[in-house]
Amino acid sequence: MGQRIAVLGAGPMGLAVAYQLARDGHQPVVFEADDRVGGMTAAFDFSGLSIERYYHFHCISDHAFLTMLDELALADQMRWVETKMGYWYQGRLQAWGNPIALLKFRGLSLVAKFRYGLHAFLCTKRENWAPLDHLDAVAWIKRWVGKEAYEVLWRRLFDYKFYDYSDNLSAAWIWSRIRRIGRSRYSLFREKLGYLEGGSGTLLQALKAAIESSGGEVRLKMPVEKVVIASGRVTGVQIAGLHEPFDKVISTVPLPYVPRLMPDLPADVLAKFKAIKNIAVVCVIAKLKKPVTENFWLNTNDPEMDIPGLVEYTNLRPLNQHVVYVPFYMPGEHPKFAEPDQAFLDKVRRYLKKINPALSDDDFIDMRASRYRYSQPICDPGYLDKLPPVALPVKGLWVADTSYYYPEDRGISESIGFGRQMAKMLVF
Protein backbone atom coordinates (compact mmCIF):
# COMPACT_ATOMS: atom_id res chain seq x y z
CA MET A 1 0.00 0.00 0.00
CA GLY A 2 1.28 3.47 -0.90
CA GLN A 3 2.44 5.99 1.66
CA ARG A 4 0.99 9.44 2.26
CA ILE A 5 3.86 11.89 1.82
CA ALA A 6 3.91 15.68 2.22
CA VAL A 7 6.03 17.61 -0.30
CA LEU A 8 6.88 21.20 0.62
CA GLY A 9 7.29 23.52 -2.36
CA ALA A 10 5.84 23.33 -5.87
CA GLY A 11 8.92 24.38 -7.82
CA PRO A 12 10.36 21.99 -10.44
CA MET A 13 12.07 19.86 -7.76
CA GLY A 14 8.96 19.54 -5.58
CA LEU A 15 6.75 18.71 -8.56
CA ALA A 16 9.29 16.15 -9.78
CA VAL A 17 9.33 14.50 -6.35
CA ALA A 18 5.53 14.32 -6.26
CA TYR A 19 5.36 13.12 -9.87
CA GLN A 20 7.72 10.22 -9.18
CA LEU A 21 5.98 9.33 -5.92
CA ALA A 22 2.59 9.26 -7.63
CA ARG A 23 3.99 7.09 -10.46
CA ASP A 24 5.28 4.67 -7.83
CA GLY A 25 1.86 4.30 -6.21
CA HIS A 26 2.11 6.74 -3.29
CA GLN A 27 -0.15 9.65 -2.33
CA PRO A 28 1.91 12.85 -2.42
CA VAL A 29 0.39 16.13 -1.22
CA VAL A 30 2.28 19.20 -2.44
CA PHE A 31 2.03 22.35 -0.29
CA GLU A 32 2.83 25.66 -1.97
CA ALA A 33 2.65 29.10 -0.34
CA ASP A 34 2.32 30.89 -3.70
CA ASP A 35 -0.90 31.02 -5.72
CA ARG A 36 0.75 29.14 -8.58
CA VAL A 37 3.19 26.30 -9.17
CA GLY A 38 6.72 26.89 -10.38
CA GLY A 39 8.77 28.77 -7.80
CA MET A 40 11.40 30.68 -9.79
CA THR A 41 9.96 29.19 -13.01
CA ALA A 42 6.45 30.54 -12.37
CA ALA A 43 4.94 32.86 -14.96
CA PHE A 44 3.10 36.15 -14.49
CA ASP A 45 0.85 38.36 -16.61
CA PHE A 46 3.17 40.91 -18.20
CA SER A 47 0.54 43.28 -19.66
CA GLY A 48 -1.14 40.53 -21.65
CA LEU A 49 1.87 38.24 -22.08
CA SER A 50 2.25 35.18 -19.86
CA ILE A 51 5.96 34.83 -19.23
CA GLU A 52 8.35 33.65 -16.50
CA ARG A 53 9.41 36.15 -13.85
CA TYR A 54 12.99 34.92 -14.28
CA TYR A 55 14.57 33.75 -17.52
CA HIS A 56 15.08 30.08 -18.32
CA PHE A 57 16.58 28.20 -21.24
CA HIS A 58 17.48 24.61 -22.03
CA CYS A 59 20.64 22.96 -23.32
CA ILE A 60 20.96 19.85 -25.46
CA SER A 61 22.63 18.19 -22.45
CA ASP A 62 19.54 18.61 -20.19
CA HIS A 63 18.74 14.90 -20.17
CA ALA A 64 16.41 14.77 -17.14
CA PHE A 65 14.29 17.58 -18.58
CA LEU A 66 14.09 15.97 -22.03
CA THR A 67 13.19 12.59 -20.52
CA MET A 68 10.35 14.22 -18.60
CA LEU A 69 9.04 15.83 -21.79
CA ASP A 70 8.94 12.40 -23.42
CA GLU A 71 7.00 10.91 -20.52
CA LEU A 72 4.48 13.77 -20.53
CA ALA A 73 4.10 13.64 -24.34
CA LEU A 74 5.50 17.17 -24.65
CA ALA A 75 8.59 16.44 -26.74
CA ASP A 76 6.93 17.89 -29.84
CA GLN A 77 6.61 21.24 -28.01
CA MET A 78 10.38 21.63 -27.73
CA ARG A 79 12.10 24.09 -30.06
CA TRP A 80 15.83 24.41 -30.68
CA VAL A 81 17.36 27.66 -31.91
CA GLU A 82 20.83 28.70 -32.95
CA THR A 83 21.65 31.58 -30.61
CA LYS A 84 24.39 34.17 -30.34
CA MET A 85 26.38 35.66 -27.49
CA GLY A 86 27.85 39.11 -27.26
CA TYR A 87 30.14 41.17 -25.04
CA TRP A 88 29.70 44.85 -24.20
CA TYR A 89 33.18 46.13 -23.41
CA GLN A 90 34.84 49.54 -23.68
CA GLY A 91 31.62 51.04 -25.02
CA ARG A 92 31.54 48.57 -27.88
CA LEU A 93 29.26 45.64 -28.70
CA GLN A 94 31.38 42.67 -29.75
CA ALA A 95 30.62 39.13 -30.85
CA TRP A 96 31.39 36.42 -28.30
CA GLY A 97 31.10 32.71 -27.63
CA ASN A 98 33.17 31.03 -30.34
CA PRO A 99 36.85 30.84 -31.35
CA ILE A 100 36.56 33.40 -34.17
CA ALA A 101 34.86 35.91 -31.87
CA LEU A 102 37.58 35.36 -29.28
CA LEU A 103 40.35 35.99 -31.83
CA LYS A 104 38.65 39.18 -33.04
CA PHE A 105 37.85 40.47 -29.55
CA ARG A 106 39.22 43.97 -29.06
CA GLY A 107 40.78 44.60 -25.66
CA LEU A 108 42.82 41.41 -25.08
CA SER A 109 46.30 40.34 -26.12
CA LEU A 110 46.77 37.24 -28.26
CA VAL A 111 48.34 35.36 -25.34
CA ALA A 112 45.37 36.19 -23.08
CA LYS A 113 42.96 35.03 -25.77
CA PHE A 114 44.81 31.73 -26.17
CA ARG A 115 44.86 31.05 -22.43
CA TYR A 116 41.16 31.90 -22.07
CA GLY A 117 40.16 29.68 -25.02
CA LEU A 118 42.26 26.75 -23.83
CA HIS A 119 40.73 26.92 -20.36
CA ALA A 120 37.17 27.02 -21.70
CA PHE A 121 37.89 24.08 -24.03
CA LEU A 122 39.42 21.93 -21.30
CA CYS A 123 36.49 22.66 -18.99
CA THR A 124 34.09 21.12 -21.52
CA LYS A 125 36.24 17.97 -21.62
CA ARG A 126 36.69 17.55 -17.86
CA GLU A 127 34.47 14.96 -16.15
CA ASN A 128 35.92 14.68 -12.65
CA TRP A 129 35.15 17.80 -10.65
CA ALA A 130 36.35 16.51 -7.27
CA PRO A 131 39.85 18.05 -7.58
CA LEU A 132 38.20 21.47 -8.05
CA ASP A 133 35.89 21.18 -5.06
CA HIS A 134 38.22 22.74 -2.51
CA LEU A 135 39.86 25.25 -4.84
CA ASP A 136 39.05 28.96 -4.82
CA ALA A 137 37.41 29.91 -8.13
CA VAL A 138 39.15 33.26 -8.63
CA ALA A 139 42.61 31.84 -7.96
CA TRP A 140 41.87 28.87 -10.23
CA ILE A 141 40.71 31.06 -13.11
CA LYS A 142 43.62 33.49 -12.74
CA ARG A 143 46.08 30.61 -12.77
CA TRP A 144 44.65 29.34 -16.06
CA VAL A 145 43.71 32.47 -18.00
CA GLY A 146 46.08 35.01 -16.45
CA LYS A 147 45.45 38.34 -14.78
CA GLU A 148 44.68 40.19 -18.04
CA ALA A 149 41.88 37.89 -19.20
CA TYR A 150 40.50 37.66 -15.67
CA GLU A 151 40.25 41.45 -15.34
CA VAL A 152 38.56 41.88 -18.73
CA LEU A 153 36.30 38.82 -18.93
CA TRP A 154 35.69 37.54 -15.41
CA ARG A 155 36.18 40.05 -12.62
CA ARG A 156 32.99 42.08 -13.07
CA LEU A 157 30.96 38.90 -13.47
CA PHE A 158 32.13 37.88 -10.00
CA ASP A 159 31.89 41.35 -8.47
CA TYR A 160 28.34 42.04 -9.66
CA LYS A 161 26.96 38.70 -8.66
CA PHE A 162 28.68 37.85 -5.40
CA TYR A 163 30.12 41.15 -4.15
CA ASP A 164 31.98 40.48 -0.87
CA TYR A 165 31.77 36.71 -1.42
CA SER A 166 33.65 36.80 -4.75
CA ASP A 167 36.94 35.64 -3.22
CA ASN A 168 35.48 32.55 -1.57
CA LEU A 169 33.71 30.56 -4.28
CA SER A 170 34.21 26.98 -5.35
CA ALA A 171 36.07 26.35 -8.59
CA ALA A 172 33.89 23.28 -9.14
CA TRP A 173 30.76 25.43 -9.24
CA ILE A 174 32.27 27.83 -11.82
CA TRP A 175 33.57 24.90 -13.88
CA SER A 176 30.07 23.40 -14.14
CA ARG A 177 28.71 26.66 -15.59
CA ILE A 178 31.48 26.84 -18.21
CA ARG A 179 30.94 23.19 -19.16
CA ARG A 180 27.14 23.46 -19.47
CA ILE A 181 27.26 26.35 -21.93
CA GLY A 182 30.20 24.79 -23.79
CA ARG A 183 28.27 21.57 -24.24
CA SER A 184 25.27 23.43 -25.66
CA ARG A 185 27.18 23.72 -28.92
CA TYR A 186 26.47 21.47 -31.85
CA SER A 187 29.70 22.60 -33.51
CA LEU A 188 32.75 24.54 -32.43
CA PHE A 189 31.25 27.73 -33.86
CA ARG A 190 27.53 27.32 -33.24
CA GLU A 191 25.49 27.37 -30.07
CA LYS A 192 22.03 25.81 -29.82
CA LEU A 193 19.63 26.47 -26.96
CA GLY A 194 16.02 25.46 -26.48
CA TYR A 195 12.66 26.68 -25.26
CA LEU A 196 9.30 25.04 -24.69
CA GLU A 197 6.24 26.30 -26.55
CA GLY A 198 4.23 28.23 -23.99
CA GLY A 199 7.28 28.58 -21.74
CA SER A 200 7.94 26.68 -18.52
CA GLY A 201 4.22 26.78 -17.72
CA THR A 202 3.64 24.06 -20.33
CA LEU A 203 5.77 21.65 -18.31
CA LEU A 204 4.56 22.84 -14.91
CA GLN A 205 0.87 22.41 -15.71
CA ALA A 206 1.50 18.99 -17.26
CA LEU A 207 3.35 17.88 -14.12
CA LYS A 208 0.54 19.14 -11.90
CA ALA A 209 -2.05 17.33 -14.02
CA ALA A 210 -0.02 14.10 -13.97
CA ILE A 211 0.32 14.24 -10.18
CA GLU A 212 -3.40 14.80 -9.69
CA SER A 213 -4.46 12.15 -12.21
CA SER A 214 -2.35 9.61 -10.30
CA GLY A 215 -4.01 10.35 -6.96
CA GLY A 216 -1.75 13.11 -5.66
CA GLU A 217 -2.73 16.63 -4.62
CA VAL A 218 -1.29 20.10 -5.23
CA ARG A 219 -2.51 22.65 -2.69
CA LEU A 220 -1.79 26.27 -3.59
CA LYS A 221 -1.81 29.24 -1.19
CA MET A 222 -1.22 26.66 1.54
CA PRO A 223 2.00 27.45 3.43
CA VAL A 224 3.20 24.89 5.95
CA GLU A 225 3.80 26.51 9.34
CA LYS A 226 5.79 23.70 10.90
CA VAL A 227 6.97 20.16 10.31
CA VAL A 228 5.86 18.24 13.40
CA ILE A 229 8.53 16.03 14.98
CA ALA A 230 7.93 13.78 17.98
CA SER A 231 10.13 11.07 19.50
CA GLY A 232 12.70 11.32 16.72
CA ARG A 233 10.29 10.93 13.82
CA VAL A 234 7.99 13.01 11.62
CA THR A 235 4.29 12.82 12.41
CA GLY A 236 3.00 15.35 9.88
CA VAL A 237 2.75 19.08 9.22
CA GLN A 238 0.98 22.01 10.83
CA ILE A 239 -1.22 24.16 8.59
CA ALA A 240 -3.34 27.06 9.85
CA GLY A 241 -2.73 25.81 13.38
CA LEU A 242 -3.97 22.29 12.64
CA HIS A 243 -1.98 19.07 12.51
CA GLU A 244 -2.26 16.95 9.36
CA PRO A 245 -0.64 13.51 9.66
CA PHE A 246 1.78 12.12 7.05
CA ASP A 247 4.00 9.07 6.85
CA LYS A 248 6.91 11.14 5.55
CA VAL A 249 7.80 14.74 4.69
CA ILE A 250 10.11 15.97 1.94
CA SER A 251 11.01 19.67 1.82
CA THR A 252 12.24 21.36 -1.37
CA VAL A 253 11.87 24.98 -0.22
CA PRO A 254 15.04 27.13 0.01
CA LEU A 255 17.25 25.92 2.85
CA PRO A 256 17.16 29.23 4.79
CA TYR A 257 13.47 28.54 5.53
CA VAL A 258 14.23 25.18 7.13
CA PRO A 259 15.09 26.40 10.68
CA ARG A 260 11.76 28.20 10.89
CA LEU A 261 9.79 25.24 9.53
CA MET A 262 11.65 22.63 11.55
CA PRO A 263 12.71 24.26 14.85
CA ASP A 264 12.78 20.86 16.59
CA LEU A 265 15.68 19.52 14.53
CA PRO A 266 18.86 18.66 16.48
CA ALA A 267 20.85 21.80 17.30
CA ASP A 268 23.89 20.81 15.23
CA VAL A 269 21.72 20.26 12.14
CA LEU A 270 19.95 23.60 12.62
CA ALA A 271 23.33 25.32 12.87
CA LYS A 272 24.36 23.93 9.49
CA PHE A 273 21.20 25.22 7.83
CA LYS A 274 21.59 28.63 9.46
CA ALA A 275 25.16 28.90 8.17
CA ILE A 276 24.11 28.63 4.51
CA LYS A 277 24.25 31.92 2.62
CA ASN A 278 22.35 32.87 -0.52
CA ILE A 279 22.45 35.52 -3.20
CA ALA A 280 19.29 37.57 -3.83
CA VAL A 281 18.14 38.89 -7.19
CA VAL A 282 16.12 41.80 -8.48
CA CYS A 283 15.25 40.82 -12.04
CA VAL A 284 13.92 43.52 -14.34
CA ILE A 285 11.98 42.42 -17.40
CA ALA A 286 11.44 44.94 -20.18
CA LYS A 287 9.08 44.76 -23.14
CA LEU A 288 10.28 46.76 -26.14
CA LYS A 289 9.12 47.64 -29.65
CA LYS A 290 12.51 46.77 -31.15
CA PRO A 291 15.44 44.51 -30.25
CA VAL A 292 18.42 45.74 -28.28
CA THR A 293 20.93 43.42 -30.00
CA GLU A 294 20.90 40.16 -31.96
CA ASN A 295 22.30 38.21 -28.99
CA PHE A 296 20.50 35.92 -26.54
CA TRP A 297 23.10 36.45 -23.82
CA LEU A 298 25.15 39.62 -23.52
CA ASN A 299 27.98 39.85 -21.00
CA THR A 300 28.73 43.37 -19.82
CA ASN A 301 31.91 44.98 -18.53
CA ASP A 302 31.12 48.66 -18.14
CA PRO A 303 31.99 50.90 -15.17
CA GLU A 304 28.57 52.53 -15.47
CA MET A 305 26.64 49.24 -15.27
CA ASP A 306 26.29 47.22 -12.06
CA ILE A 307 25.19 44.04 -13.83
CA PRO A 308 27.11 40.99 -15.11
CA GLY A 309 24.99 40.79 -18.25
CA LEU A 310 21.51 40.63 -19.71
CA VAL A 311 19.35 38.11 -21.55
CA GLU A 312 17.44 39.11 -24.67
CA TYR A 313 14.88 36.35 -24.40
CA THR A 314 13.11 36.90 -27.71
CA ASN A 315 16.33 36.10 -29.55
CA LEU A 316 15.61 32.56 -28.34
CA ARG A 317 11.82 32.37 -28.10
CA PRO A 318 9.96 34.50 -30.68
CA LEU A 319 7.21 36.70 -29.23
CA ASN A 320 5.14 39.61 -30.53
CA GLN A 321 7.27 42.11 -28.61
CA HIS A 322 10.95 42.09 -27.70
CA VAL A 323 11.59 40.92 -24.14
CA VAL A 324 14.80 41.51 -22.21
CA TYR A 325 15.72 40.25 -18.72
CA VAL A 326 18.25 42.26 -16.70
CA PRO A 327 19.19 40.58 -13.39
CA PHE A 328 20.78 42.48 -10.51
CA TYR A 329 22.37 39.93 -8.17
CA MET A 330 23.56 40.82 -4.69
CA PRO A 331 23.65 39.41 -1.15
CA GLY A 332 20.25 39.87 0.47
CA GLU A 333 21.79 41.94 3.27
CA HIS A 334 23.33 44.40 0.76
CA PRO A 335 21.76 47.90 0.98
CA LYS A 336 21.02 47.81 -2.73
CA PHE A 337 18.45 45.04 -2.24
CA ALA A 338 16.34 47.47 -0.18
CA GLU A 339 16.20 50.04 -2.97
CA PRO A 340 12.79 50.62 -4.62
CA ASP A 341 11.88 48.91 -7.88
CA GLN A 342 11.98 52.22 -9.73
CA ALA A 343 15.71 52.57 -9.07
CA PHE A 344 16.33 49.34 -10.97
CA LEU A 345 13.87 50.18 -13.75
CA ASP A 346 15.61 53.52 -14.33
CA LYS A 347 19.00 51.81 -14.51
CA VAL A 348 17.79 49.28 -17.07
CA ARG A 349 16.29 51.95 -19.29
CA ARG A 350 19.60 53.83 -19.19
CA TYR A 351 21.74 50.71 -19.79
CA LEU A 352 19.71 49.47 -22.76
CA LYS A 353 19.77 52.89 -24.41
CA LYS A 354 23.54 53.04 -23.95
CA ILE A 355 24.02 49.62 -25.57
CA ASN A 356 21.66 50.55 -28.42
CA PRO A 357 21.50 54.33 -28.92
CA ALA A 358 18.69 53.85 -31.48
CA LEU A 359 16.32 53.02 -28.61
CA SER A 360 14.11 55.86 -27.40
CA ASP A 361 11.81 56.13 -24.41
CA ASP A 362 8.89 55.45 -26.78
CA ASP A 363 10.33 51.99 -27.52
CA PHE A 364 9.78 50.88 -23.91
CA ILE A 365 6.29 49.32 -23.74
CA ASP A 366 6.41 48.06 -20.15
CA MET A 367 8.88 47.17 -17.40
CA ARG A 368 8.55 45.15 -14.21
CA ALA A 369 10.85 44.07 -11.39
CA SER A 370 10.64 40.77 -9.51
CA ARG A 371 12.57 39.92 -6.35
CA TYR A 372 13.71 36.60 -4.96
CA ARG A 373 15.59 36.61 -1.67
CA TYR A 374 17.10 33.15 -1.97
CA SER A 375 17.84 32.86 -5.68
CA GLN A 376 21.12 30.98 -5.48
CA PRO A 377 23.37 29.45 -2.82
CA ILE A 378 26.84 30.87 -2.32
CA CYS A 379 28.96 27.80 -2.94
CA ASP A 380 32.28 28.20 -1.16
CA PRO A 381 35.08 25.63 -1.45
CA GLY A 382 34.03 22.26 -0.02
CA TYR A 383 30.40 23.36 -0.09
CA LEU A 384 28.79 19.95 -0.38
CA ASP A 385 30.54 18.66 2.73
CA LYS A 386 28.98 21.47 4.77
CA LEU A 387 25.38 20.57 3.94
CA PRO A 388 23.35 18.28 6.20
CA PRO A 389 22.51 14.93 4.57
CA VAL A 390 19.32 14.81 2.49
CA ALA A 391 17.95 12.17 4.86
CA LEU A 392 17.98 14.04 8.16
CA PRO A 393 18.50 12.33 11.55
CA VAL A 394 14.73 12.34 12.01
CA LYS A 395 12.85 9.32 10.76
CA GLY A 396 10.70 10.11 7.73
CA LEU A 397 12.19 13.57 6.99
CA TRP A 398 14.15 14.62 3.90
CA VAL A 399 15.35 18.11 2.97
CA ALA A 400 16.96 19.42 -0.22
CA ASP A 401 16.93 22.38 -2.57
CA THR A 402 19.00 23.42 -5.57
CA SER A 403 22.11 23.43 -3.33
CA TYR A 404 22.16 19.66 -3.32
CA TYR A 405 23.05 19.09 -6.95
CA TYR A 406 26.23 21.13 -6.52
CA PRO A 407 28.42 21.69 -8.44
CA GLU A 408 25.71 22.03 -11.09
CA ASP A 409 24.10 25.46 -11.23
CA ARG A 410 20.41 25.78 -10.45
CA GLY A 411 18.30 24.68 -13.39
CA ILE A 412 15.03 23.01 -14.30
CA SER A 413 16.66 19.84 -15.60
CA GLU A 414 18.91 19.44 -12.58
CA SER A 415 15.95 19.98 -10.23
CA ILE A 416 13.87 17.39 -12.04
CA GLY A 417 16.63 14.81 -12.05
CA PHE A 418 17.51 15.28 -8.40
CA GLY A 419 13.86 15.36 -7.31
CA ARG A 420 13.06 12.08 -9.02
CA GLN A 421 16.12 10.38 -7.53
CA MET A 422 15.17 11.65 -4.09
CA ALA A 423 11.62 10.33 -4.44
CA LYS A 424 12.92 6.86 -5.25
CA MET A 425 15.30 6.99 -2.31
CA LEU A 426 12.86 8.13 0.36
CA VAL A 427 10.25 5.42 -0.10
CA PHE A 428 12.57 2.72 1.17
Image (tube, rainbow, N blue to C red):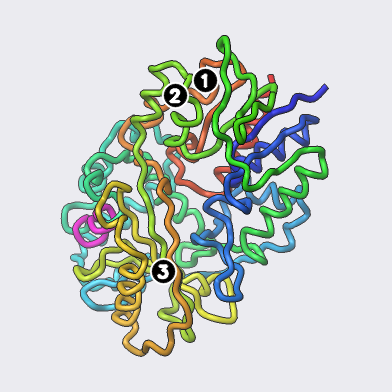
Residue tagged by mark 3? 85
* Image side of residue 162 versus residue 81, left or right: left
Mark 1–mark 2 Cα distance, whole angstroms, equals 7 Å
How crowded is the residue under tag 1: few (<14 C-alpha within 10 Å), some, or many (20+)? some
Outermost residue to the top: 231
What is the span of residues highlighted in magenta in the rendered image? 150-159
Q: Position of residue 424 (x, y in %)?
A: 67, 28
Helix, strand or loop at label 1? It is loop
Q: Nearer the viewer, mark 1 or mark 3?
A: 1
Is tag 1's residue or tag 3's residue first in the polypeptide sequence?
3
**Taking 66 as reference, is 265 above or below it?**
above
Residue 139 inside the magenta-drawn segment:
no
Helix, strand or loop at label 2? It is loop
Three-letter amino acid code at the position of disc 2: Pro
Labels in figure, total? 3
Residue tagged by mark 1? 392
Image quarter where the C terminus lies is: top right
